Every structure is written in structure tokens, then in C-alpha cells.
């Protein structure tokens, strides 16, 4: 399988009032085309920062100390702002957790999706609009109408090439002439309605003119997914896409995401703290803790044979309806502050099986089995000075 | 498990929020957040109320603490020190300080439910000071004891809320709730804002506390796992009403109401080899607005097992037709549902014919939406469709201690 | 008082506030300007010693023509009709301006806070009634209203204070009301109620402390703006006793002489006003940055 991205030894710090937050430490993550990769961890583990680094959307006080983020063969960390803009939204797009926050409440759904479409498919839309006008020209007999349509076509082609902006501004005020943009609007609207249909929104034509607050959470999330897929991206980063939704709505959205992934031949990076969701739709799972990837394996192995004590702890801390209550185990302690992360393995202070070596140096990630990576001395990692 | 004493009884509790409109601010409709809820909670047990957003469970929790005035009866039976029971009815003894001491609430969002300007020590002392229970050295000792009970240490006394993590904050909220030694604790989504591993800690804390003190819990959550971990009995709410109530094992093994069944089937499993999604019962549409809930059984428009008697009405037919007409056609049609009838008017003969055809085909297909139709009349530009009147569905006992509000079982 | 342990966290917050202040050079400038003015106001008797019974009246310099700045009169004099020593007027005017600002803003803040809190917290008809009342003040231009009030009440500095206080408090009332409406809905207010704490205590202990930040910012900005109003009144010759050491009054004395090149009469007090208002504006902005809930470490 070919790779879609490879994050190599990414170390990232944040500079804050209290000091330097060592947010990411030597993060290694590879994702293959066509898969659904789950990036799991709790608050502060660095999964969001890692996912944002793929588009270089980090906070201004972030400092990358070392590492590469190679997306589709190019190191994102070294691209220019222009090149990044062509990636964001087009080759990589995001679906956020709370649609109400991510959508502009003063714009209709149609306008928001149109924004994305026009940003990345401008030329194509104009050409299609001009084709439509040509068709109408062929069919119109009336000479006055033909003249008008010809003028419209000319205006459209000028706008597509960004020529004569003053002339265009003038025409946009003249009655009859200014309707040249209607052809374009029609094309874009058709594209949007098609997208909304794909995400199974009932009554897509009506929704185009509605505002975010007029629809339910599930519908808004679908619209967000439509926006994310509008440009047929190579990678969709879904950041807690169903956390704010009810469980019955979540089931439908997850199923939708699976269907769309196949239909659009895209890959999904699912960032979440919800292990249930991960188990349902992911192919492989990467578990992060305090800024490092502690375990990476296919989904069955992660749940059936977790090797890292943190992964084990997480799975045991989940209670499923019907489970025996006494089996619920908590992970003692709290997530460490990343201002002064523990020396060595960052999980060692909370780990029941930690050895002195764990506190000396951070364990390197090793491939225990084919495709199963763990960063833990007890899972077979090399302990400094020990030949076991 | 639970003793036979009831600690609180709810009878026909209703909470409507009026919607005002127009220049004169007249009431035009009601949001029926809680609509005729009846149940009781036994001393020492945990009753879990599960439901999705908009079902009214949080509003119900607030009513129980008299933070909202509601209709109906809420009667608390509190045991006094001398062993006798005292009945306190909320609507009458509303602000009763006695009640406020015995009933406490732990809120959903620990970040929001604590005054950001107060130190932890002051936050936990506040209820004790407000009720003038103790002060000075005695107070300090009690606060330290409470913190220890919830797993915090004295170092946390002098911190601000923003210096603590979510889990620690939630513990502070619990400590504060326990300060007055309540008999009855309402837990409103107590773990929703917390991480997975922290959720486990807090759940175990609640479990331990209940074992040690015999407190009664009313647990409100949309998370079935949380409900399952702590509850003895579970009530399922939908659109302001309780649709099923049963002991925990019974509900999980044999849920009767189609909504409960769908809810349980949609819960993701943590076993990738036995995924829930492929066999999940997926519900169509969204939860309807509590402004004007569906007639008859409120779940009927989305219910996979609905039949003719479930309360089909004009609005359901309107939704059906709306999905099958194009916007240009929809502009020319006016559909007015009113109670059991619906009037479809259009001056355009073609559209009228199309509507008529849709109805005819629907009836021939035998789908329940159409099976329930009593009469179809065509007159001029109108088509009038009549449905039978349907009453709201009440909870009926389906088994010992298992009640369901579903016509499938009557 | 606060115990040693309680002091700790509060000091940490204070240190954070100072850190934020230092990070913005403009706010440092604002603080510097205001502090300079405070020093000038305090040292007025030394900087410009009064040799008459009422130090708040500018000494008269007998000279029909305005005299340009010189050794004897550092900022010059204003000639007919004021005959004022500009330097004295500017120095003592600082004191007058500060005192006016502190008293007026202080009173207006207190009144506005009380009325606005009551309206915001109690709501309903009381809120309606109080807000309609304050609306009357907003309907009329504040300066004009102040002048009308002054003409009705009488003359003197105290009259100016009274009139401006009456005109100024509605702004605070409205702001605190809006903030209280917002904080009222917080979960921690609900939690306090559920604990059985009285509404009055909730208002004082929980709601107002969390609602007061924007009001403090407005108060600091108003410390500057009020002086624009007092100077305007002084310039128009309304309210103040003639000859009071007030920046606006001095500027008005220069009206007739401007075209004759006597720039010093208007420019020096003008610069004083400019610097003073600028200083408070910068300070208000700095305060807003510190108190901005999004960039703070957590306290609302």
C-alpha cells in the first residue's frame, strides 16, 4: 500500500507564560492510502497538534524543533504559504467536533460550501457555466436573448481569467448584464445540492438556503462532511466528529463516513478519545500519551493484545453495558504536565509495571510483530545496558 | 440492594416553557420539555435516566431540585434523626432549607459549575457556611476530610479552579455536594466533560461513596455505559416522556420499546471483531421538536415497528410528500395539517394529480403511514386526508417491575 | 485577613497580570503617562507655588497682551480677558482634572453599579422601569444635558460634578446590567442557588465579581473621557467659576488671540488634555488585555 503521509521524529514545543510545553516528542506516524487510521488519546496527549501539523495549522507559539511531516511526498513544514493554501481544503480537509463552532452562523449552508468550491475549483466552475450558456445560446431563437447570452459568456470568461476587473464591476451594476453571474450560481448550486445528497441530507435544495442554527446537530455535521469532501480530498482529518452527537445519530454519521470513504476513495484520519468509535470504523489505531505515540497496530490487535500498559489501562477503564462492574479499572494518577514531563517514559509514574530503567530514558519504538509497534521496555524494548 | 422505603415520588410532573411571540408577547406555543412523568425512587438505589438530547432529562433533574417550578407533584420522604419520616412536597415547601440540605446536585460541567474566582477551600466550605452548620477550626477540618473522601489532598485547598484538571474539578464538585451529608444526590452527566480514564475514577468514586453511606442517586446521562455502571433501575426518556423503565439487567437483555432497542444497538462495541454498526438499528430523521410533539406515540414517525394505531397524523403525510416533490412544485402547494386531518391545496392540476398518485401508490404499497388513513376526499383544488384520533401512549406494566409505553404490548 | 496560603495563588495571578502588562509596550507608555500626571498633581504646590488664598484660581498677570513663554512665565500668559499664567493653570489644572475625574467617575460608577445590578439581577418589571429611565438619558446628548442641568442648579465646581455624575451613570448601569444578565445564566450561579444560598448573597459574592471586568475597563477609559467633557464645559464657560485653574478654561482664553499668533495659550493645555486622555486610553486597553477572558489563564 502506498503511503499518504509519514510523520518522522516530530518534536514540537509551545512557548507559554509558564514555560515551554513539550507537546510532542519524537512522534512517528505513517498512514496508508485508503485506510481509516484512528489516533487515540486523552486530553493533552498531542493528537490534535499532530493532526494539525499535517496542514501546518499550529498555534503561533509553536516551535518545531526537529522532524518532518511528509504529505504526499512533500515536507509540509517547508512549503510556502501559497503551496499550503492549495493543500488545505483541497488535498487535506477537516471535519470538526462542534459544527456550530466551525460553521459561520451568518452564512447559509449553500454560501459556505460555495466558498470552498469556488476557492479550489474556480476555473472549472466558470468553464461549466460558459458551457451552459453556450447550450442556451444554441437553443435560443430570439436575437435579443442571443445577444445578451453572448455578452454573458464574454463576461464570464473575463472573470475567469481575472481580466478587466473594473469593467466587470461596472457590469455587475447594470440590469440585464449583471445576471451573468446567475449561470455560475446555478452551476455551483447544482454541485452543492449533489454534495448534500451524497451525505444523505433530506431536502438538499431547501437546506442550501438554510442557516446552521435551523438544523439539528446531526444535519450540521453532515453538511460539514459535505464541505470537507467537496474537493475530493486525499485525506480527511475527522477531529472528534461524533463526540457532540447522540449515540443514535453517531451511528448514522459513522456509517455515512464509511460509505463516503469508499465512494470518494479518500483516507480518513480519525482523531478521538472514544475507543468505541475507533473500534467500529478504524483499520489501524495509534495510541498517544503525553506527546508520544506509545502503540500502533491494526484494530483487532490493539483491542485483543494491547502491549503498552497505557493502552491496556485505557481499554480496561472502559465499561460497556453488560460488563461486570468489578472489572472496571482506573489508571491511577493524572496526565503529567508537559511543562516538566517525567524523565524517561512519560507514562512511568502511573505505570504499575514500571522498572527503574523506564525512568532513565524514553523507550524507542520497536516493531514487536508485523505492523505492531510499541514504545515500551517491557514489551521487548531494549533496556539500556541490559542484553535481555 | 434497595430498602423498601421510597425517598421521592413524582406524579404527573410537567414542565412547559412558553414561547412568546408577537408585539403583545402572547404565548403561542409551549416547549414540552417534561410531559407527564411519573415514577419513584427507592432509598439507597440508583435510578438512571437515559435519553438523548432534547428528551428532557436535565430539565427533570432541575425540577427535582426545585431549580425550576413545575406542575405535578414531587414528594420527598426524608427520615429525621428520631426515625420518623417527614414528607416535603416541593411545590409547597419550595425553598425549604431542610430540603436544600438533604438534596444536592453534581453538575455536568465542572469548569462551569464552580465560581472561577474562588479558591477550592472556599468553594467546598460555601454550603456549610450558607447553612450555618459550622465555622472556624471545625469547618477547616471538615473541608479537609471531604477532600480526602473524594481523593484530593490538602495541597488542593489553595488552588483556583483553572489550576486543576477536569477530573480534579469534578471531585471538588462532589466534595462540595457531600458537605451537608445529603440523602439524595442528583448526578447530571457527571462524567461527560471528562477523559476516559478519569471517567473510570469518578465512577468508582461514586460507587464507593454509595456503598459507604447508602445514599440514593438519580443519575442522568446520555451515555449508556455510565448508566449501566451505576444504576439499579433504568428509565429511558424520549421527548419529555418516559418510554420504558426496568431493572438494569432486564432492560439490557430484553428491551421492549423500539427506541430502547435502537439506542442499545447503536452503542459502539470495543471489540472490533464483533462490531455493532453493521447490525445497528438506524433511526431515520431527527428528534422532532418538543414544541409540538407527534401525536399518539411520540416515537412513531421514526419507529421501525410502528403500525396503524401508533398515532399517524397529517404532519407525517406532509413530510412524506415534501420529500417527493421538487422545489418548484412545493412552491405551488400548501399543506395544512391540523390535528387529525391535513388539507393539500394546489391550483395546479398536474401537481394535484401527482399528490393524489403518491397517496394512491402509498395505500397500495401497504405502508403503515397510509394504512392508517381513514378517508381521502378530493374537492376542487383540495385533497383532504383524515387520520384517526390518537391518544398519548401511557406506561403499562409489561412484566413485574418492567413498564413500557408502547402499543405493541397492550 | 488573608492567610499566607491564601495569598500565594492570588500573588501568582497578580504576577501574571504584570507579565501581560509588560508584554505590551503601549500599556507601559500609558501607565507612565498617568503616573507622571499623578506626580504632577501631587507636587502642584511645589511646581507652581500659589501666592493667593485660593490655589485653584489661576493668578492674574496684568498684561493686556498675552506674553509668550519666558523665564518668568514658563508657558506664557493669556492676556485679556483671563490674564492667566498658563504654566500655573496647566499644573493646577492637572489636580483639578484628576479630582473631577475621580469623584465623577467614582460616583457615577457607584450609582450605575447599584441600579444596573438591581435591574439586571431582578429582571422583570423592575428591570423594564429602570431601563426606560436610563433610556431617557441616552436619548439626549450628554453634554447638552449637563449644560441644561448646570444652568438649572447654579454655579460652581460642585455643580459641574453633580451634573456630570447625573449624565454619566447610565452608561455604567447599562454595561453592568448586560454583564449580569450573562453571568446570571452561568452554571455556578445555578449551583449556588441549588445549595440554598440566598439570592442577595449570590448577587454580591458570585455575580458581581464575575461581571465587573468590562465595567472596570470602561471606568478607566472614562477617567480620560470625563476630562474631555469638563474641558468642554470650561471652554464654553459653563459651570465653573471664572478663573478656575482648568484646562478648558485656559484654552478658551486663547480663542481671541489665536489669529494673532499667541499659540501658547491653547497649545500647552491642549497637549495636557491630549496626553492625559491618551494615557487613560492606553491604560484602559491594557486593562482590557489583562482581563480578556480568552487570553487569561482562566478567571472569567
Image (cartoon, grey):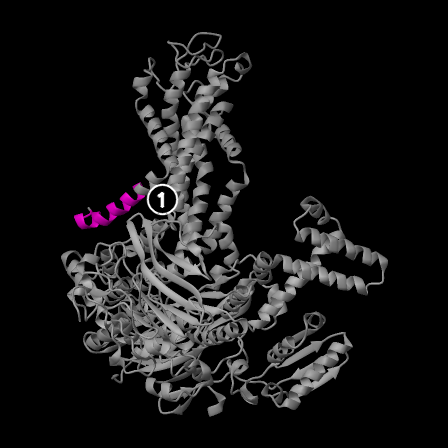
Chain of the residue where label 1 is placed in the rendered structure: C
Task: State the residue position of label 1.
Answer: C290
Residue B167 forms part of the magenta stretch: no
Q: Nearer the viewer, residue A42 or B122?
A: A42
**Does A111 sit above or below residue C24?**
below
Q: Residue A67: give x, y in percent of width and height.
A: 35, 56
Q: Quadrant of the N terminus of chain B?
A: bottom left
Q: Quadrant of residue B320?
A: bottom right
Q: Residue C252: give x, y in percent of width and height.
A: 50, 20
Q: Nearer the viewer, residue C245 or C288?
A: C288
Q: Nearer the viewer, residue A145 or B188?
A: A145
**Residue B9 appears in the figure:** no
Q: Residue A311: give x, y in percent of width and height.
A: 29, 72
**Does C1 sit above or below residue B177?**
above
Residue at 34% x, 13% y is C52
User: Over which residues does the magenta segment extend?
Assistant: C2-18
Direction from residue A178 to residue A188 in the image, left or right: left
Amino acid at each position: 500500500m502506498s503511503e499518504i503521509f509519514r510523520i518522522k521524529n516530530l518534536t514540537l514545543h509551545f512557548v507559554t507564560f509558564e514555560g515551554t510545553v513539550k507537546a510532542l516528542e519524537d512522534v512517528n506516524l505513517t498512514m496508508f492510502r485508503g485506510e481509516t487510521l484512528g489516533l487515540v488519546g486523552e486530553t493533552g496527549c498531542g493528537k490534535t497538534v499532530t493532526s494539525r501539523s499535517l496542514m501546518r495549522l499550529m498555534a503561533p507559539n509553536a516551535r518545531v524543533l526537529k522532524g518532518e511531516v511528509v504529505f504526499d511526498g512533500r515536507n509540509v513544514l517547508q512549503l510556502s504559504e501559497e503551496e499550503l493554501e492549495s493543500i488545505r481544503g483541497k488535498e487535506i480537509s477537516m471535519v470538526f467536533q462542534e459544527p456550530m463552532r466551525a460553521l459561520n452562523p451568518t452564512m447559509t449552508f449553500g454560501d459556505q460550501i460555495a466558498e470552498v468550491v469556488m476557492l479550489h475549483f474556480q476555473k472549472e466552475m466558470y468553464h461549466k457555466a460558459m458551457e451552459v450558456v453556450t447550450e442556451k445560446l444554441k437553443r435560443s431563437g430570439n436575437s435579443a436573448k442571443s445577444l445578451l447570452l453572448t455578452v454573458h459568456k464574454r463576461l464570464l470568461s473575463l472573470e475567469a481569467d481575472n481580466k478587466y476587473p473594473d469593467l466587470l464591476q461596472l457590469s455587475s451594476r447594470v440590469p440585464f448584464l449583471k445576471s451573468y453571474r446567475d449561470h455560475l450560481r446555478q452551476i455551483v448550486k447544482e454541485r452543492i445540492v449533489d454534495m448534500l445528497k451524497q451525505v444523505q441530507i433530506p431536502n438538499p435544495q431547501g437546506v442550501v438556503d438554510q442557516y446552521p442554527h435551523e438544523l439539528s446537530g446531526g444535519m450540521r455535521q453532515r453538511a460539514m462532511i459535505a464541505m470537507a469532501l467537496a474537493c475530493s480530498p486525499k485525506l480527511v482529518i475527522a477531529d472528534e466528529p461524533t463526540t457532540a452527537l447522540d449515540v443514535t445519530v453517531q451511528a448514522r454519521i459513522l456509517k455515512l463516513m464509511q460509505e463516503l470513504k469508499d465512494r470518494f476513495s479518500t483516507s480518513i484520519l480519525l482523531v478521538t478519545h472514544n475507543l468505541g468509535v475507533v473500534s467500529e470504523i478504524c483499520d489501524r489505531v495509534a495510541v498517544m500519551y503525553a506527546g508520544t505515540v506509545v502503540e500502533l497496530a491494526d484494530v483487532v490487535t490493539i483491542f485483543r493484545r494491547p502491549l503498552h500498559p497505557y493502552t491496556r489501562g485505557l481499554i480496561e477503564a472502559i465499561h460497556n453495558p453488560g460488563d461486570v462492574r468489578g472489572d472496571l479499572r482506573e489508571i491511577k494518577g493524572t496526565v503529567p504536565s508537559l511543562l516538566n514531563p517525567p524523565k524517561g517514559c512519560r507514562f512511568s509514574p502511573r505505570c504499575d509495571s514500571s522498572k527503574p530503567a523506564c525512568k532513565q530514558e524514553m523507550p524507542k519504538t520497536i516493531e514487536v510483530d508485523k505492523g505492531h509497534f510499541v514504545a515500551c521496555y517491557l514489551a521487548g524494548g531494549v533496556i539500556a545496558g541490559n542484553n535481555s | 440492594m434497595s430498602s423498601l422505603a421510597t425517598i421521592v415520588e413524582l406524579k404527573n410532573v410537567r414542565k412547559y416553557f412558553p414561547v412568546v411571540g408577537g408585539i403583545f408577547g402572547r404565548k403561542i406555543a409551549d416547549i414540552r420539555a417534561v410531559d407527564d412523568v411519573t415514577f419513584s425512587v427507592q432509598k439507597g438505589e440508583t435510578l438512571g435516566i437515559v435519553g438523548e438530547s432534547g428528551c428532557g432529562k436535565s430539565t427533570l433533574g432541575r425540577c427535582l431540585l426545585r431549580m425550576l417550578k413545575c406542575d405535578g407533584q414531587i414528594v420527598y420522604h426524608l427520615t429525621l434523626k428520631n426515625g420518623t419520616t417527614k414528607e416535603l412536597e416541593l411545590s409547597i415547601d419550595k425553598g425549604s432549607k431542610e430540603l436544600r440540605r438533604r438534596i444536592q446536585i453534581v453538575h455536568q460541567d465542572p469548569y462551569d459549575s464552580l465560581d472561577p474566582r474562588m479558591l477550592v477551600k472556599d468553594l467546598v466550605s460555601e454550603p456549610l457556611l450558607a447553612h450555618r452548620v459550622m465555622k472556624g477550626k471545625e469547618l477547616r477540618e471538615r473541608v479537609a476530610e471531604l477532600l480526602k473522601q473524594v481523593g484530593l489532598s490538602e495541597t488542593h485547598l489553595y488552588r483556583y479552579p483553572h489550576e486543576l484538571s477536569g477530573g480534579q474539578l469534578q471531585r471538588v464538585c462532589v466534595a462540595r455536594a457531600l458537605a451537608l451529608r445529603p440523602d439524595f444526590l442528583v448526578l447530571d452527566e457527571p462524567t461527560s466533560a471528562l477523559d476516559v480514564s478519569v471517567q473510570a475514577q469518578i465512577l468508582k468514586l461514586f460507587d464507593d461513596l454509595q456503598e459507604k453511606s447508602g445514599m440514593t442517586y438519580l443519575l442522568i446521562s446520555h451515555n449508556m455505559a455510565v448508566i449501566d455502571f451505576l444504576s439499579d433501575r433504568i428509565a429511558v426518556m424520549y421527548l419529555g416522556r418516559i418510554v420504558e423503565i426496568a431493572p438494569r439487567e432486564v432492560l439490557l437483555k430484553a428491551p421492549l420499546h423500539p427506541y430502547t432497542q435502537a439506542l442499545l444497538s447503536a452503542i459502539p462495541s470495543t471489540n472490533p471483531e464483533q462490531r455493532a454498526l453493521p447490525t445497528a438499528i438506524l433511526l431515520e430523521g431527527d428528534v422532532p421538536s418538543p414544541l409540538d410533539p407527534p401525536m399518539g406515540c411520540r416515537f412513531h414517525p421514526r419507529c421501525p415497528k410502528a403500525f396503524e394505531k401508533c398515532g399517524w397524523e397529517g404532519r407525517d403525510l406532509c413530510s412524506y410528500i415534501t420529500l417527493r416533490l421538487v422545489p418548484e412544485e412545493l412552491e405551488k402547494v400548501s399543506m395544512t395539517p391540523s390535528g387529525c386531518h391535513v388539507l393539500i391545496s394546489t391550483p395546479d392540476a398536474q401537481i394535484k394529480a401527482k399528490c393524489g398518485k403518491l397517496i394512491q401508490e402509498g395505500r397500495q404499497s401497504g405502508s403503515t403511514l397510509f394504512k392508517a388513513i381513514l378517508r381521502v376526499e378530493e374537492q376542487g383544488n383540495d385533497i383532504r386526508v383524515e387520520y384517526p384520533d390518537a391518544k398519548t401512549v401511557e406506561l403499562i406494566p409489561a412484566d413485574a417491575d418492567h413498564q413500557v409505553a408502547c402499543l405493541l404490548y397492550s | 485577613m488573608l492567610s499566607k496560603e491564601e495569598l500565594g495563588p492570588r500573588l501568582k495571578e497578580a504576577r501574571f497580570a504584570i507579565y501581560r502588562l509588560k508584554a505590551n509596550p503601549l500599556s507601559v507608555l500609558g501607565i507612565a503617562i498617568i503616573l507622571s500626571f499623578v506626580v504632577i498633581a501631587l507636587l502642584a504646590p511645589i511646581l507652581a507655588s500659589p501666592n493667593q488664598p485660593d490655589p485653584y484660581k489661576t493668578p492674574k498677570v496684568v498684561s493686556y497682551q498675552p506674553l509668550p513663554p519666558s523665564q518668568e512665565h514658563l508657558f506664557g500668559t493669556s492676556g485679556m480677558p483671563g490674564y492667566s499664567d498658563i504654566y500655573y493653570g496647566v499644573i493646577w489644572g492637572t489636580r483639578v482634572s484628576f479630582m473631577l475625574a475621580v469623584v465623577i467617575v467614582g460616583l457615577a460608577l457607584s450609582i450605575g453599579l447599584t441600579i444596573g445590578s438591581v435591574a439586571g439581577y431582578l429582571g422583570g418589571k423592575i428591570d423594564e422601569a429602570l431601563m426606560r429611565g436610563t433610556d431617557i438619558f441616552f436619548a439626549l446628548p450628554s453634554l447638552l444635558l449637563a449644560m441644561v442641568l448646570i444652568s438649572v442648579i447654579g454655579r460652581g465646581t460642585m455643580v459641574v460634578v453633580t451634573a456630570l455624575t447625573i449624565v454619566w451613570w447610565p452608561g455604567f448601569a447599562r454595561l453592568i446590567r448586560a454583564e449580569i444578565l450573562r453571568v446570571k445564566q452561568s452554571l455556578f450561579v445555578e449551583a449556588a442557588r441549588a445549595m440554598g444560598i440566598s439570592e442577595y448573597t449570590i448577587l454580591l459574592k458570585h455575580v458581581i465579581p464575575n461581571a465587573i471586568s468590562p465595567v472596570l475597563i470602561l471606568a478607566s477609559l472614562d477617567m480620560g473621557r470625563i476630562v474631555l467633557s469638563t474641558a468642554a464645559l470650561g471652554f464654553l464657560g459653563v459651570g465653573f467659576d471664572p478663573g478656575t485653574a482648568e484646562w478648558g478654561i485656559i484654552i478658551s482664553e486663547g480663542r481671541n488671540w489665536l489669529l494673532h499668533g499667541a499659540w501658547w495659550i491653547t497649545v500647552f493645555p491642549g497637549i495636557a488634555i491630549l496626553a492625559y486622555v491618551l494615557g487613560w486610553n492606553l491604560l484602559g486597553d491594557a486593562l482590557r488585555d489583562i482581563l480578556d477572558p480568552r487570553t487569561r489563564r482562566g478567571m472569567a
